[in-house]
Amino acid sequence: MHARAIAALVGTVAASAAVMVGAGASASAEPLHYLLPQVSASPPTTAYCELNYGYACYTPAQLEQAYNMPLLYRAGLTGAGETIAIVDAYGSPTIQSDLATFDAQTGLPAPPSFSIIQPAGPVPPFDATNSDFVGWAEETSLDVEYAHAMAPGANILLVETPVDETEGVTGFPQIVMAENYVIAHHLAGVITQSFGATEQTFPNAASILALRSAYINAAANNVTVLAASGDAGATDSELNGLDYFPYRAIDWPSSDPLVTSVGGTQLHLNAAGFRTAPDNVWNDQALFDSAAASGGGQSTVFSRPVFQNSVANVVGGARGTPDVSMSAAVDGGADVYLGFTAEDGSGVTPGWYVIGGTSEASPLFSGIVAIADQAAHHWLGPIDPTLYALGDRSPLSGIVDITSGNNTVTFTNSNNVTYTVNGFVAGPGYDMASGLGTADGPRLVAELALSSFR
């Protein structure tokens, strides 16, 4: 499934008619949509969203400022010379024009290069009536636009795969093939993945271990791999794609020790992008009346990696997620431009939308990694050992601790039974709601770049 991009779509129906939609057998792969009143052709401002929807939305400039990225840009650190690979099933039929419109209306420069490849086979033609295609098209625009927004000088490589990734093994063989192609041909120094499948939906642990070749190859070739931690709080989707497990569960590949797991926070920003309150763990439970919060917890497949020995008192003997967190809340979502028309009941027509979820967080963090690669003059490879070493020196390390919020969720499954899965509470130091914390861009870039010389 997508690490479910949770979307508040700026559509054409009245606010009083807002509905949540999700169709098809693999509904867990689809974003959740709220159809909201029409806005102008320009990106909605925070004030507009708060007045009309009752929650905030943020432009690229605000998110850049929130992570202090302009300090890097003024020093010439924009990701220049680096490439971010973004992996999505199907892609979007309008992604090139979407990015061009996004750049033109937000004042961003076009990336030096924007390429699309399909190394695992040709992608089927876009089907506007199929919610799977529509959902991945939305995901693709979110991923491309916000990886580019954070590292405006980096090249963007969109890697499209021909099989929908839902739950379990489905779609992953093609993803692995495509990522191995990127790595073997040295096409990118960082790979971001805004998708994941619940560990318990795979046939067994061996089936996950058999799909790890791309991450093993990435580590051997100094490629950094990121993955969204999931959007269902302390649980995640069952194999039927409709229900959530009534107990704690997390996503793979986010749970893989060779992958940096990126969770979600809620930002509180003014119009200039400066904080009006500290970040907290993303949990939009009240907004969606369902599981909608930052994924995190203990793996049932992977034991605690060495780099987490310093937080063994939190994760126990298992791999814990997330490692770090970035903006993911819908109440504080990202302005995204979508240029296609859907016929799946979602109401998508060309225009600006507000999207959240850890699908936003992973591409945001990929921009920071690309800039760190530029600063180091080489690819950094797996960064988790460095992040945990830095976490011991927070906040001067560039990792800003998140100390409030939780990822507890309550939901009603198709059996009409309501469950609450008690999650994890953020506090000082590492926790499985926010990881080590969030990023101060300039400090973290400096520390990541310097770490390879120590």
Image (cartoon, rainbow, N blue to C red):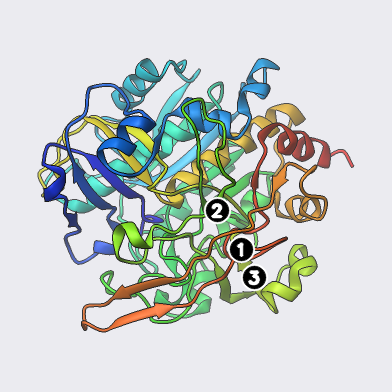
Q: Which residue is mark 3?
A: 319
- Give the number of the mark in front: 3 or 2: 2
- Whether residue 28 is situated above or below residue 220 in the rendered picture: below
Look at the picture and state if 231 lies above or below 299: above
Q: Earlier in the sequence, mark 1 or mark 3?
A: 3
Q: How many marks?
A: 3
Task: Assign a secondary structure to mark 3.
Answer: strand
Residue, disc 1: 426
Q: Amino acid at mark 1?
A: Ala
Which of disc 2 and disc 3 is earlier in sequence? 2
Q: Gap between marks 1 and 2, in whole Å?
A: 8 Å
Image quadrant where one finds the N terminus: bottom left
Q: Position of residue 102 (x, y in %)?
A: 36, 23
Q: Amino acid at mark 2?
A: Asn
Could you give the CA–CA distance between mark 1 and mark 3, rounded to whole angstroms? 18 Å
Q: Mark 1 or 2 closer to N-term?
A: 2
Residue 46 in the figure: left or right of residue 308: left
Distance from disc 3 to disc 2, alpha carbons, whole Å, reads 23 Å
Image-based side of 223 in relation to 210, left or right: right
Q: Residue at x 78, y 43 (%)?
A: 397
Q: Residue at x 31, y 66 (%)?
A: 290
- Whether residue 79 is visible here, answered yes or no, is no
Q: Are marks 1 and 2 in contact (CB under 8 Å)?
A: yes
Percent across and percent down for residue 410 are: 36, 73
Q: Residues within 10 Å of mark 3 (few under 14, many from 20)?
A: many
* Front residue of this view, candidates 27 and 107: 107
Mark 2 Cα within 10 Å, few/some/many (few <14, many 20+)? Answer: many
Q: Nearer the viewer, residue 274 or 172?
A: 274
Q: Quickly name the residue at label 2.
A: 280
Q: Closer to us: mark 1 or mark 3? A: 1
Q: Amino acid at mark 3?
A: Arg
